[in-house]
Amino acid sequence: QVQLAESGGGLVQAGASLRLSCVVSGRTFHLSDMGWFRQAPGKEREFVAAFSRSGGRTYYRDSVKGRFTISSDNAKNTWYLQMSGLTPDDTAVYYCAVATEVRRHRVPCEYEYWGRGTQVTVSS
């Protein structure tokens, strides 16, 4: 069906930048919405950013507005999360997710397909 492969995580110092990539393969023609989520140890998975292709809208978690940017390269079927000004609070496993269409972009269960996650660790 649909496969997602994330990459780009790593260990960086506070204030650094990272660009996460998510390659979406398989039967992707029906997909409309894409989201980035993250989960820190002992915490719930939380919304980071999302894009609705059908609606042409972008959504961001308040704490990442102005620092993170979601984008895509349609030719490569790849989504990106450009992260700047990273802080230790951004430390988490980051997941990309896609869906045919979601009504609540900030809710993880709305998404049908998920990647395995990529670790982002920000040292102080």
Image (spheres, rainbow, N blue to C red):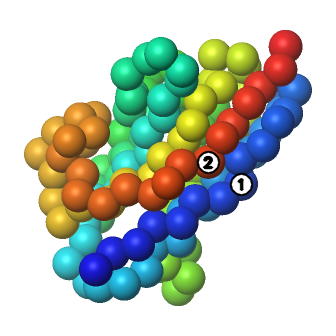
Look at the picture and state if 124 lies above or below 14: above
Q: Is residue 61 left or right of residue 91?
A: left
Q: Is residue 108 left or right of residue 89?
A: left
Is disc 2 surrounded by few (<14), some (14 to 19) or many (20+) residues within 10 Å? many
In contact (CB < 8 Å): disc 2 and disc 1:
yes
Return the x and y of residue 5 as percentages of the image width and height.
Answer: 54, 66
Q: Is residue 19 left or right of residue 97?
A: right
Return the x and y of residue 103 as percentages of the image width and height.
Answer: 12, 45
Where the N terminus falls, by quadrant?
bottom left
Which residue lies at the image location 36% right of the left edge and 84% below the top edge? Answer: 26
Which residue lies at the image location 44% right of the left edge and 17% below the top edge? Answer: 43
Is disc 1 surrounded by few (<14), some (14 to 19) or many (20+) residues within 10 Å? some
Return the x and y of residue 24 as percentages of the image width and height.
Answer: 45, 73
Report the residue marked by disc 2.
Answer: 118
Report the residue marked by disc 1.
Answer: 8
Say what amino acid the circle numbered 1 marks: Gly
